[in-house]
Amino acid sequence: MTKQKNQALRLALAQRRLFTAMSAHNPLAAKLAQEAGFDGIWGSGFELSASYAVPDASILPMGTHLEMMRAIASTVDIPLIADIDTGFGNAVTVSYIIPQYEAAGASAVVMEDKTFPKDTSLRAGGRQELVRIEEFQGKIEAAAQARSDADFVVIARVEALIAGLGQEEAQKRAHAYEEAGADAILIHSKQKTPDEILAFISGWSGRVPLVLVPTAYPQLTEADIAATGKVGVVIYGNHAIRAAVGAMRDVFAQIRRDGGIQGVDAALPGVKDIIALQGDARMREIEKKFLR
């Protein structure tokens, strides 16, 4: 199954068919994303950190993220793109962790060119320091050589626009990472309009497709993105955790206002729905077949 998932993502990139990935911080969120019709799952470090109520600043250990990726990959039938931040160290570290993520069922990793420990890209006043181009090239090369399946995708995330270093530096880094063996380039921006990203796309002359995360500029639609002809993947980077937080806040507040659950219960998914999402049908099949 993992091989098929890898091939599905690789084929989408080769065909320049826009691949949509929804964020997830646990297997249930991933299952709901698959149910909604997304092509893949974004194994978000931001969402996982938020679910533990800690900043997205390299605080959670790699093992916590890796085991969540394993749990997600085993739950869904669509490719998982794992967000491995800065690679949890240097090129040596990357060489060791790529086989682990591959074995866990990920079909791709995204690694960003910031220093360790990182700071989340959209944090106001965040610490956005980049490593040297040559150092990150080594990490990309290490990742590409460490994979056992050639269809496993290595995506280089360029943070030059986030760091305020401008288009020239962003293009320079993106081309250098492509040269080092990246299969795609994720270009990130925190501007409230898509102008900066569209300028980068217009200037991109590389062979590999681009990846966008339109969190800050939501007005850019999938049709707009596909029309550029240069973008292979769009990632909705934090919408699962935001949806969960928003819904829980509303429901919890109403229960306190009402002094009970009488006002919210009918609007919520039923317990039967949750049991079904837990895989009750499969468990019943196993019981019927093996319990004697």
Image (tube, rainbow, N blue to C red):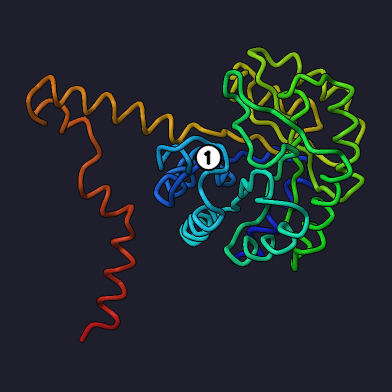
Instruction: Give the quadrant of the N terminus.
Output: bottom right
Q: Residues within 10 Å of mark 1 (few under 14, many from 20)?
A: many
255 to the left or right of 289: left
Q: Nearer the viewer, residue 270 or 119?
A: 119
Tell me the quarter of the picture where residue 184 sits: top right
The correct choice, above or below, for 136 with respect to 217 in the image is below
Position in image of residue 74 (x %, y %): 49, 62
Position in image of residue 19 (x %, y %): 66, 41
**Residue drawn 76% across the image and 60% down it:** 92
Residue wearing tag 1: 23
186 to the left or right of 4: right
Tell me the quarter of the picture where residue 146 sits: bottom right
The correct choice, above or below, for 213 with respect to 124 in the image is below
Position in image of residue 222 (x %, y %): 65, 27
Tell me the quarter of the picture where residue 66 sits: bottom right
**Residue drawn 72% across the image and 47% down it:** 12
* One can see residue 38 in this view: yes
Position in image of residue 84 (x %, y %): 63, 48
The correct choice, above or below, for 105 with respect to 209 in the image is below
* One can see residue 77 in this view: no
261 to the left or right of 132: left
**Residue drawn 71% across the image and 58% down it:** 93
